[in-house]
Image: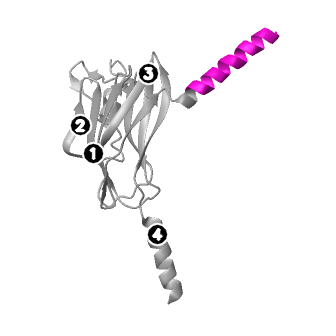
Amino acid sequence: MKNVICLSVLLSAGVASAAPVVSAEVTDIGGGLYSSVISLSDGSSIGSWAANLTFSGANGAQINQVLFGGATPVHSESMANAFSFVGSTYTKPTDTWYYDGAFTTVLPNGIAEGANSYRAHIGTAAGVNWGQVAMLHIVSTEGVLNYSGTIGRASQNYSPSGSITIPEPASLALAATGLLLAGRRRRIA
């Protein structure tokens, strides 16, 4: 009986979920634009996600939002895929949208594209378990993306807020190191 109880305690400790972490993988896509893949994680793979987060550009960052045909907002990855056909003026890599492969439900506050903001109130399907999950693809110019809102996970509500520097300081440091090495190499030759 003790082994069963210990195993049960270990299992329940394994499913406990920590506060969600909002992370970003930033990529320079050229033309002064940066793609940020915004992900959520909490160290667990149990339960679905519900997120209502707003991102806004600051310190020069302008969120890029492209309209299909100059009139139709493109909110999800599947819409972006559908509108990215040969001959189309719409370009998926330069637009901001949410990943609807994981986030299948648009919740009551929906998607809102502002002058320099993007709000997504979306959720994963009930009963689907996700650990780290890509949520948004945000394209912006250099600066800072501020975010705030609520995230529901494992019957808990959290209110994350923070900022993402575009481009990331690590990317800048790596680029600076490359420039220094290139300059040093030229002096030696």
For the record, the magenta segment spans 172-189
The answer to which of marks 2 and 3 sits earlier in the sequence is 2
Question: In which image quadrant can residue 88 be found?
Answer: top left
Per the model, the C-alpha gap separating discs 2 and 1 is 8 Å
Q: Position of residue 151 (x, y in %)?
A: 31, 49
Numbered circle sitting on residue 92: none
The reply to whether dot 2 and dot 1 touch (C-beta < 8 Å) is yes
Residue with the mark numbered 3: 142
Q: Amino acid at mark 2?
A: Ile
Per the model, the C-alpha gap separating discs 4 and 2 is 35 Å
Numbered circle sitting on residue 13: 4
Per the model, the C-alpha gap separating discs 4 and 3 is 41 Å
Q: Amino acid at mark 1?
A: Ile
Q: Amino acid at mark 3?
A: Glu
Residue 183 painted magenta: yes
Judged from the image, the secondary structure of the residue bearing numbered disc 1 is strand
